[in-house]
Amino acid sequence: MFSRDTYISRRKTLKTLVHQGIIFFPGNGESGMNYRDNCYPFRQDSTFLYYTGINNIPDICFIIDIDNDVGILFGDDPTPEEMVWTGAVKPLAEFAEKSGIGQVKPLKELPEFLKTRKEKGQRIHYLPPYRGDTSIQVGELLGLPIDKVEENKSEVFIKAVVQQRSIKSTEEIAEIDNAVNITTQMHLHAIKNAVPGRSEKEIAGELQAIAIAGGGNISFPIILTRNGQYLHNHATQAIIQEGDIILCDCGAETSMNYAGDMTRTFPAGKSYSPLQKEVYNIVLNAHNTAVEALKPGVLFKDVHLLACTKIAQGLKELGLMKGDVNEAVANGAHTLFFQCGLGHFMGMDVHDMENLGENYVGYNDEVRKSDQFGLKSLRLGKALEQGNVLTVEPGIYFNPFLIDSWEAQKKHTEFVNYDEVKKFKNFGGIRVEEDFLITTSGSRLLGKPLDKTPEDIEKFKSL
Amino acid sequence: MFSRDTYISRRKTLKTLVHQGIIFFPGNGESGMNYRDNCYPFRQDSTFLYYTGINNIPDICFIIDIDNDVGILFGDDPTPEEMVWTGAVKPLAEFAEKSGIGQVKPLKELPEFLKTRKEKGQRIHYLPPYRGDTSIQVGELLGLPIDKVEENKSEVFIKAVVQQRSIKSTEEIAEIDNAVNITTQMHLHAIKNAVPGRSEKEIAGELQAIAIAGGGNISFPIILTRNGQYLHNHATQAIIQEGDIILCDCGAETSMNYAGDMTRTFPAGKSYSPLQKEVYNIVLNAHNTAVEALKPGVLFKDVHLLACTKIAQGLKELGLMKGDVNEAVANGAHTLFFQCGLGHFMGMDVHDMENLGENYVGYNDEVRKSDQFGLKSLRLGKALEQGNVLTVEPGIYFNPFLIDSWEAQKKHTEFVNYDEVKKFKNFGGIRVEEDFLITTSGSRLLGKPLDKTPEDIEKFKSL
């Protein structure tokens, strides 16, 4: 938990931005897996945590009554009989005190509280729920049919949260550095241990153990695969083979729910093949070029397109693409190889604030999201600001289904040498990903650096 | 996946039991963690899996139209563009074929299908949902307000599922043996590695890695704690200390979703203290006595009470209890030390079928659940049948809150020596748990045996 003043100050700003009414934060409950009481690891809602600092307690709600300038935490301490199961639990009043929240009330008073305030004409602001249980709760509390919950979300509340959470404070940045450093430990373990004969899942489990030992858990499902050409291909029971390149995209989340998110692509054996190294270096060059372009004011969409151009240029030199590189990128021909976006905001969520809606988070009235293949998967397009934290993660992916489909459609034949490309249908995929903070005049790498040239990665394999 | 005939036969029996109407199985969807697309590990609904054998595919539904004798799988194969993210995915038709399901239809046809059938007067049978997302889905599909979904569940369907799933087949038992054997590996790792200086969470992460390497995941959140007196005390960042006894209650779930569930309580250092060993042996004696009593026809409630008597007897010999042992148990005085139930069914869920409701699963019209403290936490009370799989897990827990609360209330002073009990407020808790199959005349331990005497466990510590 950060200091009391941090939370008081965040809420003060929020009140100013939302201006009037009641701000309602339903904290997350437990999430049942195969029955209600067999739960997935509890994950507090990030916005709830951002404004209260209270983690690891399910089924509590927080209210800011702007009009009457009070904050109330609704929740219940366990009874002695419940402590048979839970053990000692700090009273909510103690958490409220540490967060500078003035009042604590039993959860059963929440329905009447909200009903009364609604009847008095106070607007109840809430964010769009992303769990069915929360939708049901919000619907019941506010007397809304379930299909009206989404549309009654508060746009002014969403925009205020995006404005505040997009700019990371010094203490948040230290926490993200910490998350990235744990993530680096996971990658070092993967590079050294994902060797021929072991299964993808075995290694993925070991990486999760490192994240858990770090005090939190994984920030998203681990991608550790010999089939890196599929973008969200999670670890399977496949056995790693000599000659494979392994794509590992994983991240730790700290006990305060700040995320790291990195990717390395490395040989299963001792070294990359010369061709693997060539493709790797195209990706690395695009990565480095993009990182150099990061600074306040630049559109991330432009940084994305710059990286695309570097990828197209490299693939042209390799004989897989042809024609004018800029024209190829403008037409989207490069998306045969790089089908997704260059990066995304990162913070208390690995795709930070994704639950609030991309049009508010990564885009705005000036920069609207494209629906072109490739660009439509770019989660961040708008101008960067000092204090933003984001990932840079270009890649080249030889997806055999897409290659076949495009060739059959004769798509972009003026820019793609399908006869050459077809030879890469079993190549796999390569991505290089790191996390950056936007500074006054450029960017800073988050966490301690982890080697990323093919030569340096090969050194880890011989340790 | 088991054989095609297995699933055909299970569905045939189900049709006979439910008799008429439509049986609706909404498969589980992905479960969002901190936003919709950042998902917890996918977990298929156990009943869906039991009758279809189709695992690891979210957002599919299955229908048995009893009246017209057809089975239809509703779901969508990924488009080539979606395969950019997912990679190659076997078509649903292939899964349907392996399961003996006659038809596959796109998911978008499901609402109209159900609407039409409902209008024709066919009863739509479904089980009580345990996830908010499923409640919303069922409500929308069947035109029910969200608060009417639970009450419209089908009792005849619930009873049929309980009848079938309660009796394990040979192939299921083999799968449970497998789950228990992976669980045993987790315990061996814990006993050897949970040593002074390491954190509970570090060890818990390593145990999860073993479960994941086994092909599935953990069957429930790992309890690994120096505070075993709290029944569901999950691993924390607490550092293990010399002199601690560590309670480890964990289980693996196989790739077919069958669970193991075992507990061992072992010293952090090389050996138990003499007192720890004395209390351990009371628990072990209760455990062994209960196991010997297992056989078809016996009420599990009676086995529970038998174990309680052994615990009370042992605590009387230790000077913590007094008076007539049987009277003490009848009055619930032993629940100061053993606050929960002796065991539960186990299968595709670690608390098997808990989502269907305890009154259908662990109790019936003859044996009703008690609301007495202790007995109300006993999940299984009814007569055992050949083919049942269950846990036996007695324990002694010195919960300081409960001790203080009962002493203040002067509760059961005729059976409890509070002056002696108070000396144990920092003792912790001990549980010994194994999994059993009910056979024709008794029971069989599931999985390969893992040592459980204090002396044998100490041997692992010196390896």
Image (spheres, coloured by chain):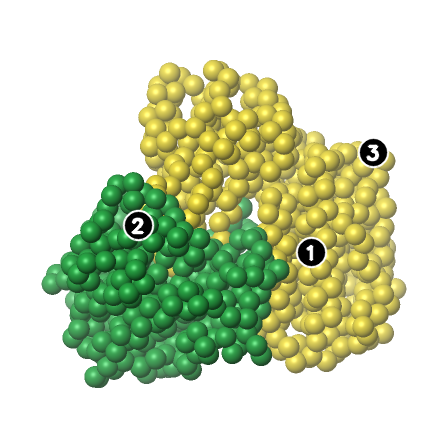
Chain colours: A yellow, B green
Amino acid type at image mark 1: Thr
Of labels 3 and 1, earlier in sequence is 1
**Distance between mark 2 and mark 3 Cα atoms:** 66 Å
How far across and how far down the image is residue A338, in percent?
72, 58
Q: Give the left or right position of residue A57, taking residue A417 as reference.
A: left
Quadrant that contains the N terminus of chain A: top right
Which of the chains bears the disc numbered 3? A
Q: Visible in this render: residue B77? A: yes
Amino acid type at image mark 2: Tyr
Question: Residue drawn at (55%, 31%), measured in percent from left and top?
Answer: A98
Q: Which residue is mark 1?
A: A183
Q: Classify mark 3: residues with Cα within 10 Å, few (<14), some (14-19) or many (20+).
A: few
How far across and how far down the image is residue A4, in percent?
60, 29
Q: Compared with residue A150, is residue A109 higher up or lower down, i.e. above or below?
A: above
Which of the chains bears the disc numbered 2? B
Q: Quadrant of residue A398?
A: bottom right
Q: Compared with residue A321, is residue B288 higher up or lower down, i.e. above or below?
A: below
**Distance between mark 1 and mark 2 Cα atoms:** 50 Å
**Distance between mark 3 and mark 1 Cα atoms:** 26 Å
In the rendering, which numbered label is found on residue A440? 3
Q: Classify mark 1: residues with Cα within 10 Å, few (<14), some (14-19) or many (20+).
A: many
Kind of element beneath mark 3: loop
In the rendering, which numbered label is found on residue B418? 2
Q: Which mark lies nearer to you, 3 or 1?
A: 1
